[in-house]
Image (tube, rainbow, N blue to C red):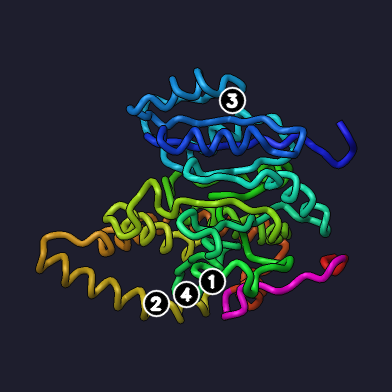
Amino acid sequence: MAPGQPLVSVVIPNWNGKHFLKDCLQAVREQSYPNFEVILVDNGSTDGSADFVRKEFPEVRLVSHRENLGFAEGTNTGIRAASGGWIATLNNDTIADRDWLNESVKATAWGKRIGMVACRLVLMSDPQILNSVGIRFNFSGRAWDIGFGAPVEGDFTKRLDVFGPSSGAALYSSEMLKEIGLLDSSFFAYFEDFDLAWRARLRGWRCVYCPTSAVKHHFSGTSKPRSAFVISHCQKNRITVMIRYYPFRYLLLGAPVVAGEFALGLARKVLTGGNPSFDGLMGGLRNWKDSVEKRKRAAASAVVSPGSLFHLYGRGAHYSSIAEGELP
């Protein structure tokens, strides 16, 4: 194998996504990058996904579970089975361009301590519209996709320094993951990549967006975007991240927003008998002791202050351009 072509382990979690797997795995099979392995983690599917993979894609290593462990822990089991120096995480409802891996690996050489690469995720329904080029966030704990809904040929055709990648199509350093740990299984799904990015950033790891590493994505192909499941998990995990990592001044700024949402959710729960937003917020608050303990651990090992990260990425800028050779 030529120098600069390390083994990449592509980890794809799957739950009842058989209808996506043919296109997803065929696109990975046809990658121009010469040195990779594919690990599909089946989270207790009942639609014949595992048998389909065994028959149609025998080169894929299959890790099967009897139950749905969620995106976070499902992905973790694939990472633990991986041999690569780099881990590429990929949603099952994606189709990667032929040069996806090749361009992602090239981006790891843009500077020192690059531990994460954000790919150019576009909407399957309209590949000229972006889904994500990385993670953005604000003082009230909300995190969402940079560039969502923007044209591909707009402001995101150049290299960028971003806070972290969407784990739906990302490249992570195995060395970094050994240092900071894997995805937090308590998140189950949603915000797990945001949490991981915080841990990585506090330890001095960097993330770059590679505009030539392209992947098409069926947005919300597995979960409905405004379902009770999505809302409750996003709210719970949002509060968890805030308590774990946000500087106190930003916790104070975000507190009135969270309190207002809490009051509104409680009122709706009383009137209607249920409210997933309120349930999620309560779930995040119930875990405050664990979150405070992890906050202490993160602070003890940090080499970068959370305040400086917030100043760079959480106050409206969200990203900065990188000229060739500029990232130290």
Distance from label 2 to label 1 (Cα)? 30 Å
What residue does disc 4 label?
251
Q: Quadrant of residue 153?
A: bottom right
Q: Please say if 259 is above or below 199.
A: below
Q: Are marks 4 and 1 in contact (CB under 8 Å)?
A: no
Residue displayed at 38% across by 59% down: 234
What residue does disc 3 label?
60
Q: Which residues are magenta?
A: 314-324
Q: Position of residue 309 (x, y in %)?
A: 65, 71
Asked whether residue 319 is drawn in magenta, I would say yes
Q: Position of residue 254 (x, y in %)?
A: 43, 77
**Helix or strand or loop: what does disc 1 sit on?**
loop
Q: Which mark is residue 255?
A: 2
Mark 4 or mark 3: which comes first in sequence? 3
**Helix or strand or loop: what does disc 4 sit on?**
helix
**Helix or strand or loop: what does disc 2 sit on?**
helix
What residue does disc 1 label?
150
Circle 3 crowding by C-alpha within 10 Å: few under 14, some 14–19, many from 20: some
Q: Are marks 4 and 2 in contact (CB under 8 Å)?
A: yes
Circle 2 crowding by C-alpha within 10 Å: few under 14, some 14–19, many from 20: some
Q: Which mark is residue 2?
A: none
